[in-house]
Amino acid sequence: QVQLVESGGGLVQPGGSLRLSCAASGMTFGFYTVGWYRQAPGKQRELVAVITDGGRTTYGDSVKGRFTISRDSAKNTVYLQMNSLKPEDTAVYSCNAKRSDFNLDIWGQGTQVMVSS
């Protein structure tokens, strides 16, 4: 069964750091473009960061310079390192994997991140 499972969310103070993990099962992550998205209450879902199967990365403007997406092929896992967190980073963060040649688009269940003092 193809599945994405996110972990690593939680409550952190402003200026703190968290590392989110997106672990894949039933699929080889290296063939997919994997993205992190987030959705805050009352707001539309927005792109946070994407890493292609070739390793190219793209970031949303609001997180550039603070967040880093990376891939560990041996662990079939994609990470999102989040530094210098702000209250406006509070949202549910979800992992997405796309493979256009097979028309595959898979979502995880999401993990809550709350930045508050």
Image: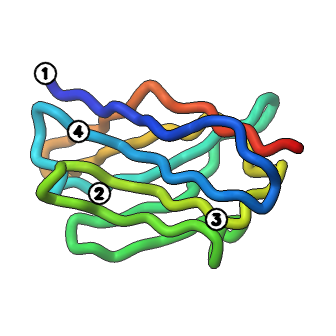
Query: Disc 3 and disc 4: Cα gap in Å?
Result: 24 Å
Residue 31 shows up from this direction: no
Q: Mark 3 or mark 1, which is nearer the start of the sequence?
A: 1
Q: Which mark is residue 83?
A: 3
Q: Nearer the viewer's eye, disc 2 or disc 3?
A: 3
Query: Disc 4 and disc 2: Cα gap in Å?
Result: 12 Å
Q: Which mark is residue 33?
A: 2
Q: Mark 4 or mark 3, which is nearer the start of the sequence?
A: 4
Which amino acid type is marked by label 2? Answer: Thr
Query: Disc 1 and disc 3: Cα gap in Å?
Result: 33 Å
Residue hosting label 4: 24
Query: Is 13 or 31 nearer to us in this picture?
Result: 13
Q: Quadrant for the C terminus, please.
A: top right
Which amino acid type is marked by label 1? Answer: Gln
Q: Mark 3 or mark 2, which is nearer the start of the sequence?
A: 2
Dot 3: element: loop
Dot 4: element: strand
Q: Is residue 3 left or right of residue 16?
A: left
Q: Quadrant for the N terminus, please.
A: top left
Residue 106 shows up from this direction: yes
Residue 46, x across and y down, in percent = 63, 49
Residue 91, x across and y down, in percent = 69, 38
